[in-house]
Structure formats: C-alpha cells, structure tokens
Image (cartoon, helix red, strand yellow):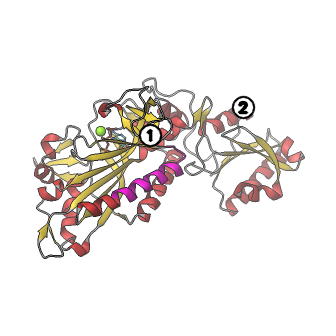
Amino acid sequence: MRQSKLFTSTRRNAPKDEVVRNAELLIRGGFIHKEMAGVYSYLPLGLRVLHKIEQIIREEMDAVGGQEVRMATLHPSDNWKKTGGWSSVDVLFKIQSRTEKEYALGSSEEEIVTPIAQEYIGSYKDLPLAVYQIEQKYRDELRAKSGIMRGREFGMKDMYSFHADQKDFERFYETVKQAYFKVFERCGLDAKVTEASGGAFSNKLSYEFMVLTDAGEDDILYCGQCTHCVNVEVAKHAAGDTCPKCGKGKLKKARAAEVGNVFDLGQRYPKSFGFTFKDKDGKDKTPVMGCYGIGTTRLMGTIVEVLSDDKGIVWPATVAPFSVHLVAIAGGNADVTAEADRVYELLCENGIPALYDDRDERAGAKFADADLIGIPKRLVVSEKTVSAGGIEVTDRSNGSSTLVADSAIVEHLRM
Ligand code: ATP
Ligand code: MG
C-alpha cells in the first residue's frame, strides 16, 4: 500500500489521559483511535495486525477440531435470567428497549452457545463438540486504564466444548492448553500458565496464560527453573521461597497480563437449560462443559508492551501489518522515485506485503515513522543506494543493515 494513500498518519503525542505504552504507541502510529475510556476503533494498520492475530488463533482452534461460528452479541435477557447471570454478573451491560424488553450485551456467550448446542446434541454420538468465535465483547469494567489491554468493548476468541464425561473433557482441556502455547509463541510471546481458582464461573480449577509485563494487572509467582507459576491471589507461598514443584528454583514475583484462560465449567450451564443427551446405556445425562478465552485485543496490546523500544513498536513478522516498509528518499530526484516505484511493483508482483512510503517528506521524518510503526524490515531506496546498485535493508529488531542487490531482493526477503 502506498503510504500517501493511507488515510491515517502518525502523531507526535497520544491523548494526555493515556498512561500506558500500548495505547500511546498504537494511537501515535495510527493503528487505533480512542473513542472513550476502554473503547477504541481499529484503523487500517491496526486492523491488519488484529486480523493476523485472529488468523493464528483460528488456525490453532481449527487444528484441535473447533468449529467457527458467530453468535449474537445482543442477547435475550431470559437466557441470562435462566443461568442467574442477569443478577450476578456485575460487568453485564443491560439494555432496555423502547418496548420495555430487556437485553444484555454479550460479555461472554455461555447463555447463547448452550441452547444452540442443546438443539443439535441428542446422543453421546454427537459428542464431543467444540465451537468458537472471534468477536466483540462488552463489559462494564470499573477501570479501563490499560489501553487496549482492558476495554469496555474488546475482542475475544471464545471457545466452548461439550463432553459426555469428565474424562473426555480433561483430554480436550489438555489439547487446548497445548494449542494456546502455540498461539502465544506464534505471536512472539513467552506465556506462562498459572493454576488458579475459577473465580465467578466455577469453583473448579482453571488455567490462566500469563505474559510478564508491568502493564499487566495480575501479580504472579513463578519458578526460575521449572514451569511452576501461580497467581499471587491464591498462592500459599511468597517470593524467595523454594519452588514447591521442583524444590530447586526460588520463586520470583512479577507483574503479568492474562492473555487467555481455560475453565472447567462442569455441568452448570447445561443444567440451567435442562440440556441432556442419551448416553450409551440409553439414560439421560448432562454434558460436561469447558470454556476457553483469548483476549485478541489484549494480546495485541501485550505484544506492543513486550516488543517495543524507545522509538516505537517492534512487531514480530507473524503479526506485523506489512512485512516490508519501503522508504523512498528521493529528494526530488526522479531516477530515485522511478527505482523505488519499480521495487514496490516487484514486491507486489511477488506477493510481499509492503507499505511504500512514497510521501514527500524529510528522510528523518520517514525514518521516525518507520520506527514507530515497527514493520520488521525497512527497505531504503535513495541516491546512495541507487548508485551502489542495491537496496538498504534494515532489521527493525536489531537495527542491523545490509545492502542487497536489487536482483536479489525478493529472494533475500523470503529467507
Ligand atoms: P480479567 O481477570 O483480566 O478481567 P477475566 O478473568 O474476566 O479477565 P475472561 O472472562 O475469562 O477473563 O475472558 C477471557 C480473556 O479475555 C481473558 O483472559 C483476557 O485475555 C480477555 N479479557 C477479559 N476482560 C477483558 C477486557 N476488559 N478487555 C480486554 N480483554 C479482556
Ligand atoms: Mg474480568
């Protein structure tokens, strides 16, 4: 895409009330637009990143057998009254129609998915079932000061599974846990998994996936030598204690962001809706249910928090809005512009997603914008590179530069 055509531009300052880095950098880079506290619009660059994150998640959920759906976000209040959520879920946004009917805005989708599954599952042969969606959620959060990491409207992948018995649920639960590690790794993050109590949803065990960052809202204790990790809220230990799991490492305390979690919901929701199936012995049984969330927009914010430097964002290639930022430093020289145009066409022809800075701007401003936007590879075409017969390729993550002959550029970028 030609940057001269991109309707957004970078800005020097973020709104004064933005205190966290993810919001500051994403707003300054033109990725998102703030509507009010906890509510953001996603602009072309930001949407490209979000789509890539969603696609990684989609591939991993499909790989464990999840079937993608899109469920309603405007919910009938009756469903929430049946499960008790109407009076117990404090973050639920409730809407009153002019006809005096009441609705809820989806904060989670157990109330919708359970009756859907009930309609199609009659026998043990229909189980297990896992369905997921990637969609907006609405929550009346009291504080929304973490940029896109805590929204009142935000993106989530939510999957729900139904099983004939606890054993089958536990098998699937473990599979999803492994898929979650793949998702976070593909997004360039190192996630730890905590064991914690399931909070409002259930008193059974749940797992939370945590990424270390000061912008997070959770405190965790983790072992430096093994995978042991717990939320401080539920911990029986303290920082400096010997790890109760491996007995070797010392526990460290850190701030972390919960990017995802998996819950054992038991039979609570199926019971609320009178959902049973015929088991092998012909008897009516209630399915066991699990739910699995990933905050897609929180994940994007976490990537920015963890992978950025004093100049801007450093996107991992897997989620970057473009693979290449082609920067023309022409200074009025038509030959340089012609060469940069040619390189841009070459990239397009070869299917290499490129943002082409063809604007009439100073070199310094273009480089500062490229650093802020954080595309992994910067390609510079200037008088200097044209006379040397090449293109300067700079790596955003470590700043290293090389001159690559134009005939070899496509091959170089594919390496
Ligand atoms: P938290 O403790 O951070 O409020 P939660 O326990 O309420 O999270 P869930 O209801 O299980 O989270 O939602 C699943 C995932 O959605 C979370 O792991 C998190 O990544 C994300 N998430 C939850 N609330 C928000 C929010 N207000 N803004 C952005 N992402 C959120
Ligand atoms: Mg919450």
Mark linked to residue 90: none
Above or below 173: residue 227: above
Whether 259 is drawn above or below 285: the answer is above
Residue lying at 55% horizontally and 49% vertically, measured from the top left: 319
Residue 147 seen in render: no
- Dividing the image into four equal quarters, which quarter contains ligand 2? top left
**Which residue is located at x 20 percent, y 52 percent?**
75
Q: Which residue occupies the extreme right position in the image?
A: 387
Query: Horizontally, is 357 left or right of 50 in the view?
Result: right
Q: Position of residue 25 (x, y in %)?
A: 53, 33
List the residue tagged with mark 2.
Answer: 364
| Amino acid on which the number 2 mark rests in the picture | Gly
The kind of secondary structure element at disc 2 is helix
Q: Could you say where residue 277 lies in the image, as x and y percent from the top left?
A: 16, 70
> What residue is pinned by disc 1?
246
Residue 172 shown left or right of residue 331 in the figure: left
**Residue 346 versus residue 376: which sits nearer the camera?**
376
Label 1: which secondary element: loop
Q: Looking at the image, is 339 positioned above or below residue 332?
A: below
Q: Is ligand 1 less than 8 Å from the beta carbon at label 1?
A: no
Q: Nearer the viewer, residue 186 or 362?
A: 186
Q: Main secondary structure of the magenta part?
A: helix
Q: How many marks?
A: 2
Mark 1 is surrounded, within 10 Å at the Cα level, by few (under 14), some (14 to 19) or many (20 or more) other residues, namely: few
Which region of the structure is painted magenta? 173-190
Mark 2–mark 1 Cα distance, whole angstroms, equals 52 Å
How packed is label 2: few (under 14 Cα within 10 Å), some, or many (20 or more)? few
Mark 2 or 1 closer to N-term?
Answer: 1
**Residue in the image at 75% along x and 59% along y:** 411
- Does the magenta portion include 94? no
Whether residue 352 is visible = yes
Residue 19 image point, x, y percent: 45, 25
